[in-house]
Structures are given as structure tokens and as C-alpha cells.
Image: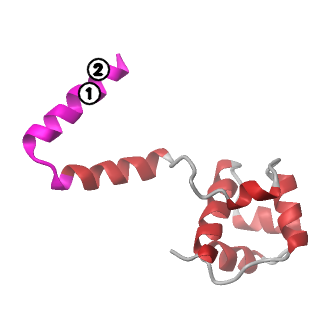
Amino acid sequence: MNSLELFGKRLKELRKLNKLTQEQLAELIGLDPKQICRIENGACFTTFETLQKISKIFNIEIYDLFYYEHKQTKDALVKEMNEIFKNASDDKIELIYKLVKAITF
């Protein structure tokens, strides 16, 4: 994944975390919704002025827009765990189950 794609993924994550549609975010920062879509898909970047607006909307520092080592969403974690389970032996799945059960009680 290249840096444009990583930035787009981060922007999308922040937008969804703040319960905004692409259209709503576009309106708040003065861009066309298609431009937000292109940024989120890693097809283009944006200006420093727009980065300032985005960081203000999400109440974060500009550098936080580039923090890609972020917490995954529940859906992403479940998807990743399902991939792990597909390749795991029955014994390992049982062990994982016991570990999860132990830490949730």
C-alpha cells in the first residue's frame, strides 16, 4: 500500500469514526464529494490548507492524519481473526477460544 492509499485509509477511518458521510465532510471543508472519494481511494492528495481544515474538524493535530499505525475497527479485527482461523488447526482454535474466554470474564 503506498502513502496516498494509507492517507486515504486514515481519512476514511477518521470520517467514519466521526459518523460523517463523504458528502458531509466535503461540505465542511469546501470540497466536492468526488474529491473526498478520490482522496480516500488513494487516487490523489490534497493541499495543506485542506489538511488544516480536516484536522480542525476531527480535533486532531495535522501529523495525526499521517498516523497509520492505528487501532483497527472491530469489523477489521473480526475479519482478520477469521483469516487466522481458516489456517489454524483445531487445537489452536480451541486454545484461542479458551484464551479469549479467560480474558472476557
Q: CA distance from mark 2 to mark 1?
A: 5 Å
Q: Is residue 96 magenta?
A: yes
- Which residue is identified by label 1? 99
**Is residue 2 placed above or below 78 in the rendered structure?**
below
Q: How is the image coloured?
A: secondary structure
Q: Nearer the viewer, residue 29 or 23?
A: 29
The residue sitting at 67% across, 75% down in the picture is: 37
Q: Amino acid at mark 1?
A: Leu
Q: Residues within 10 Å of mark 1 (few under 14, many from 20)?
A: few
Q: Hey, which quadrant is residue 103 in on the image?
A: top left
Visible residue check, residue 30: no
Magenta region: 86-105
User: In the image, is 42 to the left or to the right of 83?
Assistant: right
Element marked by disc 1: helix
Q: Compare residues 23 and 13 and report the one nearer the observer.
A: 13
- The numbered disc on residue 102 is 2
Total tally of numbered discs in the picture: 2
Residue under the point 66% across and 56% down? 67
